[in-house]
Image (spheres, grey):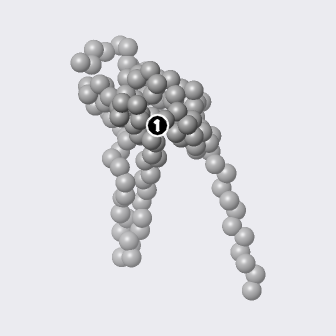
Amino acid sequence: MQRRRVKKRKKGPEAVIQKNIIEVLTYNRCSVFRGNVGKVRTPDGRFFSTGLPNGFPDLFGWRWSDKQIFFIEVKAPHGAIRQDQLAFHADLMHRKVIHGIARSPEDALKIVKQGLIGYGYPDTDKKIWY
């Protein structure tokens, strides 16, 4: 019996950026976790949603120096922001939490090291959040 070959899916640009961001932030004294979500079919045929709420950023963690939490939404160079991600961003803005959109490891490091709030989101400088 021959084994069926399974083609490996190539990682998309966002996955590669995400992996590099985790490496860079870990090297710069941060604990970083990937928010993993998905849907699973139960034995009776229904779908069960696992994981985090809609709009939750791709990466989250804290700086070792001051235990300050941060959230990073990873986007490919031309990736768009969804409405649920904007809603999560608005909540983080009101709470003054470090977060932003990173399109490269350099963006992520800048967000975390400088403690930027709302970096990369289109409406950050146009509203009064506090």
Q: Is residue 77 visible?
A: yes
Which residue corresponds to the image point at 37% horizontal and 64% vertical from the top-left? 47
Q: Residue furthest bottom?
A: 1
Up/down of 120 relative to 86, above or below: above
Specify the amino acid type for callout 1.
Answer: Cys
Farthest front residue in view: 65
Measured as percent of width and height from the top left, residue 32 is found at 46, 42
The quadrant in which residue 82 appears is top left
Q: Secondary structure at mark 1?
A: strand
Question: Is any atom of residue 58 visible in this view?
Answer: no
User: How far from the left and from the top, in percent, is residue 119?
Assistant: 44, 22
User: Residue at horizontal 76%, vertical 81%?
Assistant: 2
Image coordinates of residue 17 in percent, x first then y, are 59, 38
Tell me the quarter of the picture where residue 92 sits.
top left
In this rendering, would 118 be left or right of 129? right
- The residue wearing badge 1 is 30
- The answer to whether residue 48 is left or right of residue 7 is left
Check the image and name the residue furthest to the left: 130
- Identify the image quadrant of the N terminus: bottom right
